[in-house]
């Protein structure tokens, strides 16, 4: 630095803020800005309609697991501070979201989750039907086909868990009363904190905490992806929100790659996976905003039904509008 800075200005460099410390401070307190504005918006409008409280569940669990992971396997302290700040702001955000939630919200209005066994039964071919009967030497082909069905149904059921259209098992994070949410958060924190205390010197437990926390956080965009797919529209989706996600992804990946040397590879992989989901949301935005209307016009340019809305399964009254 001294090679290009005039000598008469060198004494003043001591008063300039350290760049690395400034970046670390910004990283640690970024959640206060991004989610703090959301809290203010909910309070100002006196309604949380359009905000998915799944975000609170995801960030509270992921941040707590990351804090416990630090106890066993210390990592960059900036990420630890960010997790602590995230716990605070997400607790405030959850409080506002539940307080100003629509009084008509009722999880019983959501569609029941399809049964796994029934879906498998519907997907598997009827072996009793002579037309579907195979020779004995096709045993392995039948076995592979069955496993493909089981895998396909399992993936579909997993994705439905993130779909706001369906009732989750035990109505997880779809409860009607706020005390149920706080009871779960307290139980989650207590169980994992106690387990970490008992397994304090277990590297395997520490690795499990780190991977689980990052996996939970990386799945954050999934509910948005499934909701846009169900609505087949982005009319109420804010583009500025998508750009803020991209900015956060780039900042996180850049920081993990170049801002620190003490970071596990699982942090980088999880950040890349989450960014890939955000990129897919960008594809959905372009597709539903520009390509779908164009396709409808090309299919039936003279039809009087062009302006008619596309038929979709009606969303239950319990579901708020898109964020």
Image (spheres, rainbow, N blue to C red):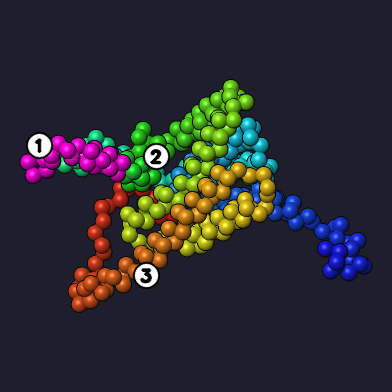
Question: Where's residue 11, x and y in %?
Answer: 91, 61
In x, y percent, where is residue 100? 47, 46
Which of marks 1 and 2 precedes in the sequence? 1
What residue is rendered at 44% in x and 48% in y? Answer: 52
Q: Which mark is residue 64?
A: none
Identify the image quadrant of the C terminus: bottom left
Residue holding disc 1: 128
Under circle 3, the secondary element is helix
From which residue to which does the magenta span run?
128-153
**What is the CA distance from the residue labelled 3 to the residue labelled 1?**
48 Å
In the foreground, 271 or 306: 271
- Checking the image for residue 174, the label placed there is 2
Query: Seen in the image, is 113 located left or right of residue 1?
Result: left
Judge whether 213 appears above or below 293 on screen.
above
Which residue is located at x 23 percent, y 76 percent? 301
How far apart marks 2 and 3 lie (CA) works out to 33 Å
**Element on which disc 1 rests:** loop
Which residue lies most toward the front here?
A: 137
Q: Quadrant of the N terminus?
A: bottom right
Question: What residue is rendered at 56% in x and 49% in y?
Answer: 268
Specify which label sits upstream in the sequence, 3 or 1: 1
Q: Quadrant of residue 309?
A: bottom left
Category of crowding for the residue at label 2, using alpha-carbon neighbours closer than 10 angstroms: few (below 14), some (14–19), many (at least 20): many
* Labels 2 & 1 near each other (Cβ < 8 A): no
| Pointer 2 or 3: first along the chain | 2
Residue 137 located left or right of residue 7: left
Q: What residue would you read off at disc 3?
A: 290
């Amino acid at each position: 630095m001294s090679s290009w800075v005039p000598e008469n200005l060198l004494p003043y460099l001591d008063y300039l803020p350290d760049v690395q410390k400034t970046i670390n401070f910004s990283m640690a307190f970024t959640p206060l800005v991004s989610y703090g504005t959301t809290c203010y918006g909910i309070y100002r409008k006196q309604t949380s309609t359009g905000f998915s409280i799944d975000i609170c569940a995801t960030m509270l669990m992921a941040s707590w697991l990351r804090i416990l992971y630090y106890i066993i396997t210390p990592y960059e302290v900036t990420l630890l501070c960010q997790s602590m700040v995230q716990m605070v702001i997400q607790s405030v955000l959850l409080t506002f979201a539940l307080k100003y939630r629509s009084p008509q919200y009722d999880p019983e209005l959501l569609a029941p989750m399809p049964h796994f066994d029934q879906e498998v039964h519907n997907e598997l071919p009827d072996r009793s039907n002579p037309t579907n009967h195979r020779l004995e030497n096709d045993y392995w082909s039948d076995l592979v086909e069955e496993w493909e069905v089981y895998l396909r149904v399992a993936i579909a059921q997993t994705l439905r868990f993130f779909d706001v259209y369906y009732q989750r098992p035990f109505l997880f994070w779809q409860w009607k009363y706020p005390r149920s949410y706080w009871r779960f958060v307290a139980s989650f924190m207590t169980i994992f904190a106690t387990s970490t205390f008992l397994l304090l010197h277990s590297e395997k437990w520490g690795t499990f905490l780190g991977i689980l926390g990052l996996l939970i956080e990386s799945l954050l965009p999934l509910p948005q992806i499934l909701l846009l797919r169900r609505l087949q529209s982005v009319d109420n989706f804010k583009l500025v929100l998508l750009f803020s996600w991209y900015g956060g992804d780039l900042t996180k990946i850049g920081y993990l790659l170049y801002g620190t040397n003490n970071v596990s590879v699982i942090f980088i992989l999880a950040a890349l996976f989450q960014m890939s989901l955000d990129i897919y949301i960008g594809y959905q935005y372009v597709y539903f905003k520009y390509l779908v209307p164009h396709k409808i016009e090309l299919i039936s340019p003279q039809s009087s039904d062009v302006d008619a809305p596309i038929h979709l399964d009606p969303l239950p009254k319990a579901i708020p509008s898109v964020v």
